[in-house]
Image (spheres, rainbow, N blue to C red):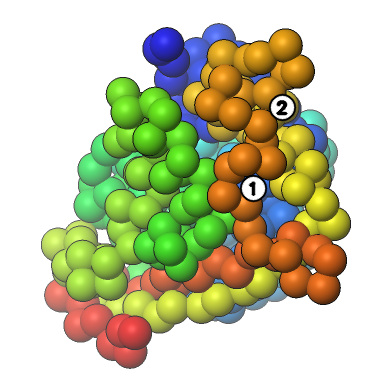
């Protein structure tokens, strides 16, 4: 089989975004880490915030709650389908969706008081270019933050599925493993160095959530939150051809619930203009 990827990991060419499925699978985990990202970027009332790779707007929604009516959150994404989903969800004068490449960012220099990128940088063809663009549009003396996924074994919500699908779809293995491409803290510090930031801090944070059943975990995946997973061949029982969903190594059961703990690397950087020194790496 082959999959023609669209602009952005979670959309296929010409396809729309199933916002409900995306929210059930990606959103429920992303929101656990958004408050830390907003704190690291020092987002405050009245700020102009750029949310790079906004997706369906999970981080933008929380940022809007912080900046209030006097602030503005710009959601930037390379995928028009994602922006449509975000615009439908965040119908407010405080949110502005903009279609632009995260590696170039079509904004004037020093346009924003804060820049955030929630679970997006690892999918950039050139993450360093993306960081350089973020530095350019950030006001002097202000902060920005990025959140990326840790190692596959530290993020079972993604890691188990990616490893399983990679075995059955080796031609798609590289795309599957992109989620973990910035898990190495030394590499994170290095690319911030190249982009010209200083006072960089890299830290690991862990959150845990649960599912009432395996079906709750699997349903949004089958609905198409990952284009490659949705396009798997089906059996007569509407199960992926590699076997029943229950045959996939699932998140562990705790007190009758399906649970998965995810670890992320949170990075924040301040005062652009000088070579950064990574601090507090774990």
Residue that lies at the very extreme toward the bottom in this rendered image: 280
Residue 197 appears at what percent x and percent y? 25, 70
| Foreground pick, 48 / 231 | 231
Residue 241 appears at what percent x and percent y? 57, 20
| Foreground pick, 218 / 38 | 218
Dot 1, crowdedness within 10 Å: few (<14), some or many (≥20)?
A: many
Q: Toward which corner of the image does residue 272 lie, by quadrant?
A: bottom left
Where does label 1 land, which residue?
Answer: 26
Q: Toward which corner of the image does residue 257 lie, by quadrant?
A: bottom right
Identity of the residue drawn at 23% across and 52% down: 128
Query: Measured along the vertical axis of the image, is residue 169 above or below residue 247?
Result: above
Residue 199 appears at what percent x and percent y? 29, 83
Where does label 2 land, which residue?
Answer: 223
Of labels 1 and 2, earlier in sequence is: 1
Query: Measured along the vertical axis of the image, is residue 89 above or below residue 229?
Result: below
| Foreground pick, 62 / 95 | 62
216 horizontally vs 98: left or right: right
173 horizontally vs 236: left or right: left
Q: Where does the N terminus fall, quadrant-wise?
A: top left
């Amino acid at each position: 089989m082959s999959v023609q990827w669209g602009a952005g990991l979670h959309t296929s060419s010409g396809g729309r975004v199933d916002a409900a499925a995306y929210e059930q699978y990606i959103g429920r985990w992303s929101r656990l880490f958004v408050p830390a990202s907003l704190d690291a970027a020092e987002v405050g009332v009245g700020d102009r915030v750029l949310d790079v790779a906004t997706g369906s707007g999970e981080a933008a929604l929380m940022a809007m709650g912080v900046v209030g009516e006097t602030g503005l959150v710009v959601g930037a994404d390379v995928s028009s389908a994602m922006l449509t989903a975000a615009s439908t969800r965040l119908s407010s004068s405080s949110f502005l969706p903009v279609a632009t490449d995260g590696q170039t960012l079509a904004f004037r220099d020093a346009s924003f008081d804060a820049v955030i990128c929630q679970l997006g940088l690892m999918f950039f063809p050139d993450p360093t270019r993306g960081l350089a663009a973020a530095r350019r549009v950030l006001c002097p003396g202000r902060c920005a933050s990025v959140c990326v996924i840790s190692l596959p074994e530290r993020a079972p919500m993604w890691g188990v599925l990616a490893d399983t699908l990679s075995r059955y779809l080796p031609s798609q293995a590289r795309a599957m493993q992109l989620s973990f491409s910035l898990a190495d803290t030394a590499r994170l510090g290095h690319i911030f160095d190249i982009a010209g930031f200083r006072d960089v801090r890299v830290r690991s944070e862990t959150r845990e959530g649960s599912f009432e059943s395996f079906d709750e975990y699997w349903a949004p995946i089958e609905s198409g939150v990952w284009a490659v997973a949705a396009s798997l061949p089906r059996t007569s029982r509407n199960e992926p051809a590699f076997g029943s969903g229950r045959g996939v190594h699932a998140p562990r059961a705790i007190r009758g619930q399906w649970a998965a703990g995810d670890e992320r690397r949170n990075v924040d950087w301040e005062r652009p203009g000088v070579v950064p020194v990574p601090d507090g790496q774990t």
